[in-house]
Image (cartoon, rainbow, N blue to C red):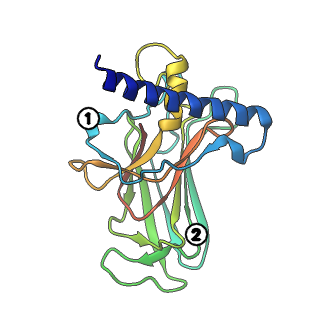
Amino acid sequence: MPKQCSRRYAGRLLAILTTVLGVALAAGCGGGDSSTAPPPPDSTTTKPESDLHFMHASDSAPPLAQKSVTFYAVRGEDREVRLFYHARPGRNDSTEFLRFRVRSGSLVQRPDGTPIAEGDSIPITITVADTTRLIVQFEPSGLTFATTDPARLTLKYAEEDDDLNDDGHVDATDLALKPLLGLWRQESPSDPWILLPTSVSLVISDEVEADVPGFTRYAMAY
C-alpha cells in the first residue's frame, strides 16, 4: 500500500476509534445529552444508492405493527405520530421504529405553492416503502416546512441487525460504524441520496434524528 494511502487509512481509523472512545466515556459519566453524537460537519454529502449500507431489521425482530399511517398536521399546533413494531410474545410494550413531529410553526407551503394559514390542516401519510432497507416515504410530495421551525424525524435502530457491515460477526468494527450512521434523503428512486445533519444516540435511545426540509424518502444508512 503506498505511504500516502497508509497515512490516510490510519488517520480515518484513528478518528473512528476516537469517536467510539468518546461515546464510551460519556456513557460512563452518565447524563442523557452526552450520549448523542453531534451532527456530522459535512451535510452536503451525496452518494449513489449502491454506495450506501442501509440499516435493516434483525432476524429476531418482530414485524412492524403498521407500515403506513396518516394524520393531520395543523399550523399553530404541535403534533406527533409514531410507528411501532409488534409487541414480543409475553410482553405488553412494543419497540418504537419511527417518530415524526410537526411543530406549531413548521407548516409553510402546500405542494401547489399556496401558503398554509394559521389553523389550516393538511393530511400527512408516512409509508414504509421498503421493509427490508426500512426506507420511509412521506407524502404529499412538495410540502415544505419553515427553516426556522422545521419538522423533526427520528428513526430507531433498537430492533436492527447489529452486524452493520454484514460480515457475519458483531464486533468492534460494527461498534465503530455506529457513529457514522445518518439520516439520508432521496427525492425519487433514481436520484442519489443526500445526507442530513444527523444526531446519533448511541447509548440510551438507539436512534438517529434530523430536521427535515420537506417530503421525500428517508432512511438510516452509513
- How far apart are labels 2 and 1 at the CA level? 34 Å
Q: Quadrant of the C terminus?
A: top left
Q: Which residue is mark 2?
A: 103
Q: Left of 119 or right of it: where is 110?
A: left
Q: Using the rendered view, name the quadrant where residue 166 is placed.
A: top left
Mark 2 and mark 1 lie on one chain; the one further toward the N terminus is: 1
At horizontal 51% and vertical 64% (from top left) the residue drawn is 151
Is 37 in front, or is 8? 8
Residue 138, image x, y percentages? 39, 57
Mark 2 surroundings within 10 Å by alpha-carbon count, few (fewer than 14), some (14 through 19), many (20 or more): many
At horizontal 50% and vertical 82% (from top left) the residue drawn is 120
Image mark for residue 216: none
Secondary structure beneath label 1: helix
Residue 61 seen in the figure: no
* Amino acid, disc 2: Arg
Of tags 2 and 1, the one toward the viewer is 1
Residue 4, image x, y percentages? 32, 26
Residue 16, image x, y percentages? 51, 30
Q: In the displayed structure, would residue 41 be above or below residue 151?
A: above
At horizontal 39% and vertical 25% (from top left) the residue drawn is 7
Q: Residue furthest top?
A: 168
Is 132 in front, or is 191? 191
